[in-house]
Image: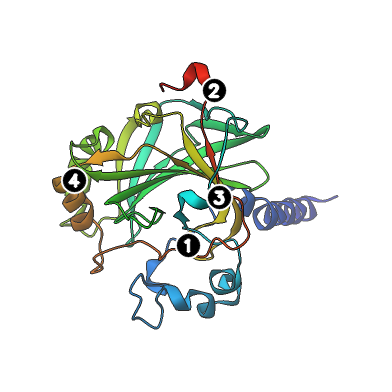
């Protein structure tokens, strides 16, 4: 094989890798917020997301959509799901303004969680104001999503809900970077090493159900874990997030979706751990 043929073959193999392998390794969320809106009155609002692109049809037609109301009368309490198995590590991160939210992305991942024998790498987290999930119809002030992905592209998200109260320690670290992004047209800031183990959960109890991404394309079969304990965030921190996001929306939370025939479980530790 001559050099020209060898170069062509190498290029073709690289192209096939990019087409078929790269999508498996990246988040499936849409980053360009100009294509959709959270305004329910808008023609590109949540009720119309499934009409914007054929590949977004699950947003309107899917029967396993998120978020949902964590309604206690539908909950099955169990101790068989097991403790939330987190194996995180400190890693260099970048804060990215996606226009509809602020996302903290870890370069190369920041460790893993394990669910039912599958390992999911922590790739990024982002915030929604107010919460997307509700508890018995009650909506809180902020929701943090930790987005994980397995090597075969499956997604698992941990959600933490917040109400107004004491400042959140992670947001306290992010405030200077968010303030720096707010007045400028920059979309990202390197923030150095961030340890996801510093994100406080405060309870071993959690809700578990199968749902979807809460932004287009609303991909289904996402494993959701919502921490039972509602944590706190200050009003000032909420304001910093809203001022940093480069849009005019007052909220970036998708309306609650129908549970349909899905199961909804609440993990409650055994007797020895009940006090936790």
Q: CA distance from mark 1 to mark 3?
A: 11 Å
Q: Which residue is mark 3?
A: 26
Q: Residues within 10 Å of mark 3 (few under 14, many from 20)?
A: few
Depth check, mark 2 against mark 4: the one in front is: 2
| Frontmost residue, 163 versus 241 | 163
**Dot label at residue 30:** 1
| Frontmost residue, 91 versus 140 | 140
Q: Which residue is mark 4?
A: 237
Please report whichever mark, 1 or 2, sits nearer to the chain's N-terminal start. 1
Element marked by disc 1: loop
Q: CA distance from mark 1 to mark 2?
A: 40 Å
**Dot label at residue 270:** 2
- Say which quarter of the image contains residue 248: bottom left
Rendered residue at 34%/30% (across/down): 200
Depth check, mark 3 against mark 2: the one in front is: 2
- Asked if residue 241 is positioned above or below residue 60 in the image, the reply reads above
Element marked by disc 4: helix
- Asked if residue 46 is positioned above or below residue 16 in the image, the reply reads below
Depth check, mark 1 against mark 2: the one in front is: 2
Q: CA distance from mark 2 to mark 4?
A: 36 Å
Identify the colour scheme used: rainbow
Contact flag, marks 1 and 2 (Cβ < 8 Å): no
Please report whichever mark, 4 or 1, sits nearer to the chain's N-terminal start. 1
Q: Where residue 151 sits: x, y (%)? A: 65, 41
Q: Residues within 10 Å of mark 4 (few under 14, many from 20)?
A: some
Q: Where residue 266 sits: x, y (%)? A: 52, 40
Q: Where residue 101 sits: x, y (%)? A: 33, 56
Please report whichever mark, 3 or 4, sits nearer to the chain's N-terminal start. 3
């Amino acid at each position: 094989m001559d050099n020209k043929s060898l170069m062509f073959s190498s290029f073709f193999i690289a192209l096939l890798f990019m087409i078929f392998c790269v999508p498996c390794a990246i988040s499936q969320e849409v980053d360009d917020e100009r294509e959709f809106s959270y305004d329910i009155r808008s023609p590109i609002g949540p009720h119309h997301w499934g009409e914007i692109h054929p590949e977004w049809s699950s947003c309107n037609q899917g029967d396993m959509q998120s978020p949902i109301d964590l309604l206690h009368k539908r909950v099955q309490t169990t101790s068989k799901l097991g403790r939330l198995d987190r194996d995180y590590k400190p890693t260099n991160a970048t804060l990215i303004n996606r226009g509809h939210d602020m996302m903290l992305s870890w370069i190369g991942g920041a460790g893993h969680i394990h669910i039912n024998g599958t390992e999911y790498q922590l790739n990024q987290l982002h915030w929604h104001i107010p919460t997307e999930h509700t508890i018995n119809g009650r909506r809180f002030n902020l929701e943090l999503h930790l987005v994980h992905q397995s090597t075969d592209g499956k997604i698992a998200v941990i959600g933490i809900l917040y109400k107004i109260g004491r400042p959140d320690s992670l947001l306290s670290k992010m405030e200077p970077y968010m303030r720096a992004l707010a007045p400028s047209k920059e979309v990202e800031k390197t923030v150095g090493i961030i340890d996801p183990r510093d994100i406080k959960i405060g309870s071993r109890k959690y809700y578990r159900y199968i749902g979807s991404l809460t932004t287009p394309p609303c991909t289904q079969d996402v494993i959701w874990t919502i921490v039972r304990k509602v944590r706190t965030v200050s009003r000032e921190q909420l304001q910093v997030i809203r001022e940093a996001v480069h849009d005019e929306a007052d909220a970036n939370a998708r309306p609650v979706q129908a549970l349909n025939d899905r199961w909804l479980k609440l993990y409650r530790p055994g007797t020895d751990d009940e006090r936790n």
